[in-house]
Each structure stands twice: as structure tokens, then as C-alpha cells.
Image (cartoon, coloured by chain):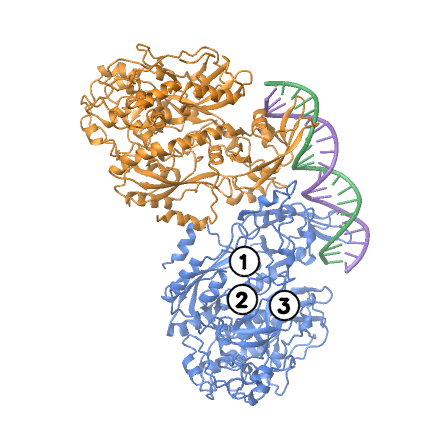
Chain colours: A orange, B blue, C purple, D green
Amino acid sequence: MIDIMHSLEKTENQFEKYLDSQLWHACAGGMTQIPPLNSNVYYFPQGHAEHAAKNVDFRSFPRISPLVPCRVSSIKYLADVETDEVFAKIGLVPLRGRECEVDDEVGLLGFDRGFDRNEEKEKLNSFAKTLTQSDANNGGGFSVPRYCAETIFPRLDYSAEPPVQTILGKDVHGEVWKFRHIYRGTPRRHLLTTGWSNFVNQKKLVAGDSIVFLRAENGDLCVGIRRAKLGIGGGSEVSSGWNTGAANGTSSLYKSGFYGFSSESGLKNECDSRVKEKDNVKIASVIEAARLAASGQPFEVVYYPRASTPEFVIKASAVRAAMRVQWCPGMRFKMAFETEDSSRISWFMGTISSVQVDDPIHWPNSPWRLLQVAWDEPDLLQNVKRVNPWLVELVSSIPTIHLSPFSPPNKRPRQHLEFPFGQLPMSTLLSNPLSPSSPLCCLPDNISTGIQGARHAQFVLSSSDLHLNKLQMGLRPFDFKPLDYGGQHPQFITGNPLENCNSGGSPHCLKMESSVQYLKKPNEGKNGARTPMFVLFGQPILTEQQISQSCSMDAGGNSFSDGYHDTVGHTSNASGSAVIQNSPPEASSDEEFPRLKDQKHEHCKVFMESEDVGRTLDLSTLRSYEELHRKLSSMFGRSTISSIVVYSNAVGATKLIGDEPFG
Amino acid sequence: MIDIMHSLEKTENQFEKYLDSQLWHACAGGMTQIPPLNSNVYYFPQGHAEHAAKNVDFRSFPRISPLVPCRVSSIKYLADVETDEVFAKIGLVPLRGRECEVDDEVGLLGFDRGFDRNEEKEKLNSFAKTLTQSDANNGGGFSVPRYCAETIFPRLDYSAEPPVQTILGKDVHGEVWKFRHIYRGTPRRHLLTTGWSNFVNQKKLVAGDSIVFLRAENGDLCVGIRRAKLGIGGGSEVSSGWNTGAANGTSSLYKSGFYGFSSESGLKNECDSRVKEKDNVKIASVIEAARLAASGQPFEVVYYPRASTPEFVIKASAVRAAMRVQWCPGMRFKMAFETEDSSRISWFMGTISSVQVDDPIHWPNSPWRLLQVAWDEPDLLQNVKRVNPWLVELVSSIPTIHLSPFSPPNKRPRQHLEFPFGQLPMSTLLSNPLSPSSPLCCLPDNISTGIQGARHAQFVLSSSDLHLNKLQMGLRPFDFKPLDYGGQHPQFITGNPLENCNSGGSPHCLKMESSVQYLKKPNEGKNGARTPMFVLFGQPILTEQQISQSCSMDAGGNSFSDGYHDTVGHTSNASGSAVIQNSPPEASSDEEFPRLKDQKHEHCKVFMESEDVGRTLDLSTLRSYEELHRKLSSMFGRSTISSIVVYSNAVGATKLIGDEPFG
DNA sequence: ATGTCGGCCGAAGGCCGACAA
DNA sequence: TTGTCGGCCTTCGGCCGACAT
């Protein structure tokens, strides 16, 4: 394969050393989602240009699509030689026509799972800590959280007085750093002393940066760094008050001159800055990528996961799912952000204030940053005005349902959003938005059995939870209910009651399938056996008996379809199992709940109450209660899971399960 | 003017800041000769490629001349942002045909002089010191040589106890550095203390590097650095034992890690190395320059004066002069090199061992590195095997004269050396090398008055002088003799008695005018009045009366022609003043003694015996004894010059003059 | 459990005159 | 005149437990 861009970069960066994928992801942070190898994605030139942090002139490509369907042909995990900043080179092969459809399946079935497993393992073996002032201070050591010392570091011999050992850690370049690890003080605590200061200075770390310890599969201890982002969200402006500590990052790096005059001298050239100037991604690269993409040739993009701009190579399924939603002003949603110290992920609630194409002149039909939003906590997200639809998650569709029957159909010509995948014939859907077979604006007409919002209700999150450092909602029981129990009303958020969608002038309601599709009774219109089952954070949990049953059935995995593929595959045919027929169960759990796949909803943190130590659990890999039980038992080293195990997902909702089996 | 290369470089180095020419030359060192603006030069692509320190593939320019006549259209004095290394961008406009001839005159008459004046001033206002171990040590200060403190630094108030002041020095980027200057200790000495260590660290200086203090015209004190070259001469290999101290330059720059392991980590990326990797001049630049040069378009070259490769943009007159010499194996010569610490210039003696084109395959007719040489002190110049003819200076032509009458004329076909200037019709000269009007191989037939080598004898240097730190030959009287005193025999060097030229097989004797032309009686065949005059290191010194006389004469300045232009202008006409007729005296003193112009022969160091402080004197600017006397008086602050003033030139020859006038 | 502080100690930085070349 | 050295003082780096959160 001819790869011009790659060879270009080779010349400036002769020695490319590929990182371990685990370490790379640990450094990239929890928000980073690199699409799996051979999966189908959309490439957004617009986002690529944004990533380059420069104004890119695309005039030479007048007709390039704002989103180019591609297959991921290669992924290289790399790290900047100077700053240790991780980045990836993603090889993309543009797709067209039938190719999209066919290959999409391959990607979904073949490789998605492998990636998720990797991520799971990483979570188990790595620990990230944000450096405190004391950690980053010159004369100091590093306070090692007990959990890290006990689970990641080599076993310490506590019989010595004091217990000490030497820690060797490999960084992203394979260089080994040496630390003295001591367990001392009153009360006892783990500390890194000798060697730590040198590490801080060499890596130019400041308070707010994070260090990642990871125990690799071969037993090596790895050490990565994750620099604090200057601001939350995607804008170039720094949000006020958020993470200001890291903005002034030079104070502890350089001795100021004797009279203070020479500090000016030393900081000029880029070698001395701890973070390279933001020209990682060159304009030329963007142009070249766009050129090749437009002409259907393979190309390669460079992506810096910590560059504070949204990802521009997005899993096709996520984009498709987002495009199926009929976005309306007034919709309530939540969106994930990395916290200031990059240690956690916070979900921020907001309301869609407007749905309009971001840059109609240059990218007339682009869904990129389609949604203008108003945040419940606008202070922290001042510079986040527009977001990508596939990054937000609706928390309740009730306002849409309540209001749309009384709002007049929008007479204005809709903006045509490009959507080049063959699987989703835009023209059909858009040309007749009011046809019975496709969803109406704010009026889903194919909901037959009313609201069955139990699954969504599970994600309801009061905004007061957002700033809890610990999840303390704990001990109230989780009501497991079989999905086919009808009549269960969702727990509604009563935020802004969506005046926008009701007022006559401004509402823009765009595209396709209503979000209330999510609430559609999953088994409706399927050949699905109405098997009783349980859902944990939207992830169906079956007994092993149920699995063997469903496998023996015609399309057992499809029983859990939320209705996406019904609409996708057969806009005029309500009963469809054809598209994903014969898919093995593993695949179905991934693709059939794409809304849940986004942003780690399948990952739950499991706390053992006696320890207050959370372990992460990938629900998507659990196919039975038995499997869950085994996993939990091995996690906590006990043979039985007692009732004090509390489940909590990233949102902060917590559940307590009893010792008795689910079913 | 379209200048592709320039604009290319602009993009990578956005802010080009031009240096003061004086500071630039002070940093570049005494060996650097940048040809004057608008002067005519030869551009050597071969040397350019060598400068890039890479193998450049010139196959795309099959017929590019190895030396391209050009006019210097621009000179930019610049310094590397990171390393402070000075470099120049020289704009060149290829010349052809008549253009060469005409414009050469303009260059010679118009601009050469201005440059020399600059250099003179710089010498007077700057001081360079090579850092000792103590200077470069971490815990130390800087020992300021008294001369530097008293002539370059601001006046110190000695009434205080101790006398202290703050020194502010601007570096090449205009940044100001602050030093505490104190005069203390027993015995008293000048020191820089506070601020010095910081400077050393920031600039990553090591013992062997030099610091240059310069008092600019506006009174500002400037501070430049001049890093030690890794080896003397032009090769890429480091000569053994020479300047080894600087080769290991990292010891004092970085604290080694606590356990020593992290020093490995810190030194990897190029930002931490004190000298950038040797890719200053890119291959692409060389190719591009060659392309433009071959097609006659203007181009620009980047030249790093401290890159240890010979200059590749050479004053046309110097090349022409060298090409007129009939180079023969066995010829004795000297060549200037910068000393290890770059504080002085040493002349090394050698013998031409062979005359053959360096790279006959790629550059079949190139004079570049034409001479293969054997050094009298081969140890120090192990890697200098081949040198450019215009860089060597014959010290005696006696072997040629002695031997050539008995050696048979070389029958082998001569190698054709390209020489594209119109003024020197190669074809004529080469096609008939034995014609009476052009010099024979080793047999000058146009010497009419025997040997008159007084001028050359003045430059004879015994190799034992080379390593003297001080010029101590001092006090023997200098025999001033009018030039038209005939019969004075030169002081011959009796080194290797040139067996090569006598042996039948190997001698290659190439090109044109015999070196004994230098010994030709200058006034012979001229319209010159046989005015008695004195020559100081080859620089004629007239009384003011003589000047006014010669100005009123037809070609007064030409009286001092050494015969170059006779041969050049009129190969078949022995009496010629036409070429340089009407030249003002200033111009003539420059161009008519080109051999003396090279390598600062016109600069003498003047020592006041009571002080042992040398001042530099530019003889070429002196046009009368009175002027010399005035200059010396003002230099030493005395109204009369007593007999204890000793003259010594860079070679080490010293002269003592009396109080009485020359004439 | 762990962030921050002051105390303490040793190393390095840095200024000094002595002394010698 | 000036390079180098040892002495001496200060500053900084860095390890420690105390204490508070």
C-alpha cells in the first residue's frame, strides 16, 4: 500500500517505536477510544483540521464529504520522543458503496471484542494518580496510594524495618527509571523517594499531571505520564478556574536566574517547554489526508488523544446511531468529560439549545458539532458551545414525547446532512420524513406499547452527583426487573421543560429515528422468545442456560435488539432479523446496544465495601450471571460474593446486589 | 527577486533576526572571510555538499560547473536560536560572459574596502577568550583578562573596596545577560562572579569554548560564544589528541542521576545536546542551490563558519590567483588553521605531494581540494589530506626554480580544470601551456630580473614558532629596504628538496602562471616611478608626500602591482596598466596584493613592550608613515612612538622600528 | 489513607584569597 | 597576569516523622 504521509513523517522522525497498546491507553486516558483494527469508521476532515489547531484551507477539495467512511487498516501506538505525549497513527482506507455495508459487519464481528478485552485488562493492572503539589515539589517524594503500591508495585517485604525496595519502571520509550520505594512514617504509608525528583525534573512534571503505573502482561512495571489538559472540553480557550494550576507550568522546572533576568533567556526555545508547541499535526498533513480521502486512496492520520479536541475518526456505528436520533432543541442529555486531574470522568448535564450545522459555508451538510448546547453548570464548560451528536447521551426523551404531538410539523426545508454509508439511505429517510415507516419529527409513530423506560431510567443522574469524589449513594437495593415486565415508568428528569421545542420560531428538529426508539420494548416485533432476563446497566445478563437456549434459537442474540436494526435494515418492514441474523452472541451484545457501547457504559466499578477499593468490570464481556459471579469472586479473592458488594457505573448510580442468584 | 530557498527556510525559522556584522564576525572567528556584498565570487557546489556533511547526489545536474561565477547579492548574518551558532545566508546571482568581467571591477572597487574597515574596527573593540577549566567549572567564576576588562568592559570605579560593577551583555539574540564584575584577590584581578555560572549553564559552555566580548558602535556590550571545533582542519574525523577536552562536553552540564541511570535518559533528544546535530545545511538546500546555479537563477546558500569545512563561496580574485599558479608536487607552502582554542591562527607548513582532481568521476575538472599535501607536522593534521589551492600560500618557489630547468616538460595531457570567468580564457592558456606568454610547468620563462624574494622572505616561518603562545622573537631590528633595491636574496626554506618534481613518473604540474611570479620585481614593466618606498609585511608605506605624488600620476596606485594584472590583462603584452588604470589607491592596495589580502596578512599585532599588550593594526588602511604614526600614538596614548615598539604579524615575525621616520 | 509542613542533613553552588606558573 | 586550588559559607535537594484532613 502506498502511504505517502507515512513516509513523509518517517523522514522527520526516523525511529518510530511502537508502544504497548495497554500503556498507550493508560496514558491516553479513559476518554480515548481508538476504533478497532479493520472496523468501519467515519473520518471527519473538519475535526482533523480542528485537531491541527489551525485554520486549514480546504478550498482545493470543493466536494469532499464532511464525513468519509473508512476502514481502519492500521493502528500504531506511538509516543513523542521529547514530551512522552502519546499519539496514534491510524491508517484509513476509504470505502464506498456496497463495500461499506459488507465490511462493516466484518469489523463488528471480528475485532471489536478484542479491543474491549484489552481495555479490561489494562484497567485491572494500571493505576493513575494525579500529582499533588507535594508530589511535584522539588524537594519531595511521591505519596503512593496504598492501592497502587499493593496491586501494581512488586510485593514489598514488610518484615524489614523500614520496608524498602527498588522499583524499576519502563517509560513509553522503554527507558528504565529507578525509584526507591519505602513504607514508613506514622501512620505508615508508601512513598517513592530517591529517584522520584529526578523523574519529575526530567519529565518536567508539574502538579496536576498524572503518572500512570501499569503492570504489563510480561510482569514489567511501566510508567507513563499524562499531562493535565489546559482546559476541559474542546475549545482552544482555557476555561476559567478549571485546571489553572497547570497553565503556569514552569515555576518548578527551572531555577530562576540569580537576579531573575535569565529565566527569560532559558524559556524561549521550544526545547525547554514541557509541552511542545501545538503543531503536532501539521496543516499539510490535514490537506494531504483530505486529498487522499477525497480521491478514495488510503491515507494515515495522526491523532493526539490529549489534544483537547474531539476525536475525528469515529466508529461508524456510533455515528450512525447518533444520526438516527431526531435531535431537537430542548432535549436533555449528558456528556462525559475528563475531570481536571484526568483521574475520573464526569458527566455533565445539558440541554440542546439549537441544532444547526456548525460551518454551513465550508461544510454545508456536516454533522460535526451539530448540537449547540446549554450546560446545567455553564461555568465549568464555558468554551464548550457545540458538541458532536455521537458524544452526547440522551437522558430522557419524555419532553419530546410530551410536546411534539402539539407542535406543528416544521415546515422549513430541513438541512441535508450528508451520510454516505450505503446502509443508511439518507435520501429515502429525508425525502419523506413523515412517512409511517420512518420516525416523525418529535413524534414517533411506531411506538406500539408505550413507554418502557426502565433501561434509560437507570442512567438518570442528578447533577448533584457530579462532584462527588466517592460514590456514596451506596446501599439502597437495586430493583432487578425482567425487561418484558410492562408498564414500568421511567424515572423522569424534570429539568428545563423544553420551551424551545414548543415555541413556534426556532426549533430545528433534525433527522430520523426518534430518541424514544430507545424506549421501545426490545422484544417487540421480533422473533425473540420472551425469555425472562436481567439487565445490569443496560447490559443483559443471562444465565448460562439462557445462553445455550438463545444460541440454539434462530437469532438468539437478537432478542436484545433495541430496535436499531429494525429501522436501519428495513425502513418499510417492521419485522427484521435479517441484518444481524446468525450473528454470534458476542457480536450482538456489542452492536445491538450501540448507545450503551459509547463512553464505557459497559464498564462498572465494583467496590468492596470493606476495602473501598473499586475494581472495574466490563459488563459487555459478561454473558451470564455465573460468569459475573466468577469474575467477582476472583477479583476479590473470595469464593462467594456477599450482599455488601455494591455496583456503581461511571455515572454514579450505585446498586447493591444480594447473594442470591439474579434469576 | 524570486528566492525559493529563502522562503522555504522562512517557514521553518519564522523569525529571522539579523545580527550585527561585527558581533557575527567576532563569533565566527578569525578564519572566516565572507565575501563583500556585490563582489564576485565562485560558488563551489562540491564544497556546499561537503558543508552539508552528507553525500549529495548531483546526478540530476550532469553538467553543472564545479565552480559557478556569481555576484554576492545579499548577506544576512544570523545565529541559531538554540545554540547561538552563527551562520550566514549569502544570496548569489550567477554571472556569465562579459558580465563577469565588468562586474568584477565594480565589486573590487566598490565594496571590498568597506568590509575591511569593519573588520578593523571589530578587532579593536572585541576580545575573545577561550574558557579554561576554571572558567567553565560549575562552582566558579570567570577570570577576565586585564586587557578585556580595561578596554572592552565599562570603566570600573577603582576607588571602591572592592571595586565592583554590573556588566550587562547582549547575546546574539539581543537577550541581555547580567554579570557581577569584581576586581579583587591578591594579586588583584578581574573576575566575573554572580551570573557567570548561569550563563555557562544556559549556553552549555565547556572548557575550550570561547567567549567573545565586543563593544558595539553604539556602546552596547555584546557577548558571543564560539564553540570549540571538534577537530582542526576540514575532515569529519576528529584528529587525535587535538581538542579532546571538548569532545566529551556533557560532564558538567547535567547532574548525573542519583544512581547514575538517568543520565542516559536525559541526553537522548537533541534539545539537550549543546551543539545541534550536523544537519544545519540540508541536502535539499544543496540540490536546490545547484539547480538554480546551473540554470543561472539567483539562489541563496547557508554557511556555517564553524562547521570545519572549507568555505565554498570564495572571492573570485583569490580563486583566480590560485588558478594562475602552476601547482607542482614538491612545492612548499603554509596554510592557516585556527588553533584548538580558536584564539589564534596557526600556520602549518607542508609540501604538495600531488596535484590531482579530487573526485574525477563526479567533478572531473574541479579545482576543489586539488592539492594533496604532506604536512611537516602530520600528527596534528592527520585528517587534512587535500586542500584548496586558494587556501595555501607558497613560502618559497626556489625548488621550482632550481629544479625545473632540468626536469623534462611534462608530456602527459594535462587535466582540464574548469575556469569559467571571461577574464581568464582557459582554452587559450591551457591549449598552449608552453607558449612564451604563459608560464611553463616548473619553468617560468618570463622572469627577467632574477629572484627578488624579499617580500616573500618576510613570511618565512620556522615551524618551531607555531606553538609559541607569545611572540617572543622580538627585538631584532627589521631591515627596511626599498623594493627596487635589486639583488636581495630571499631567505630560503630548505625543507624537502622536492624529489617528486624531478622524478619522471608522477609529477603533475598544472596550470598557468608560475608561483615565482610573486617574486617578480613589482615595478618592472610598469610606468611606475621608481619612488623609494617601504614595505611593512608586504604593505607599502608611503609618506603623504609620496601619496599626493602618486595620485597625480597616471596610475600611481599601480606602482605597487605585483604583476598579477600584467599577466591577467595582457598575456601577450608585458607592459600594462590599462586594467587597473585610474583605480583609487584604496582599491589598488586591496586587489593588487591579493596574496597578501588573504588570511589577514595586512593585520599586524602591535606590542608595547612595557605592557605586553598587543593591539591590532590594519596595515592595508595605512597609506602613509604619518598615518601609521598617528595611529600608534593614539593606540598607546602617547604622543611619540619610541623605539621599543615591536611589530609582529600573525605569522610570528616581529620587527622593531626606530623613532626616526621610514624614509 | 494521604497531603502538607518543618526539621534536619548532606551535597552542590558559589565567592574568596593563596599560591604558583 | 591569570589558572587552579582549598576553605568556607549559603542554598538547595531530599529524606524524615508530625500532624491534619
x%, y% of residue A231? 45, 31
Dot 1: within a 10 Å radius of its alpha carbon, few (fewer than 14), some, or many (20 or more) residues? Answer: many
Contact (CB < 8 A) between labels 3 and 1?
A: no
Dot 2: within a 10 Å radius of its alpha carbon, few (fewer than 14), some, or many (20 or more) residues? Answer: some
Picture layout, residue B110 above or below residue B574: above
Residue B200 in view: yes
Same chain for mark 1 and mark 2? The answer is yes
- Helix, strand, or loop for circle 3? strand
Q: Nearer the viewer, mark 3 or mark 2?
A: 3
Q: Which residue is mark 1?
A: B24
Q: Residue at x 51, y 53 (%)?
A: B80
Q: Which residue is mark 3?
A: B346
Three-letter code, disc 2: Asp
- Quarter of the image that includes the N terminus of chain B: bottom left
Q: What numbered label is drawn on residue B388?
A: none
Contact (CB < 8 A) between labels 1 and 2?
A: no
Three-letter code, disc 3: Ser
Residue B12 in view: no
- Quarter of the image that includes the C terminus of chain B: bottom right
Same chain for mark 3 and mark 2? The answer is yes
CA gap, disc 3 to disc 2?
Answer: 21 Å
Earlier residue among tags 1 and 2: 1
- Of all chains, the one bearing label 1 is B
Picture layout, residue B17 above or below residue A275: below
Q: Which residue is mark 2?
A: B116
Q: Along the horizontal axis of the image, is B433 left or right of A434?
A: right
x%, y% of residue B513? 50, 82
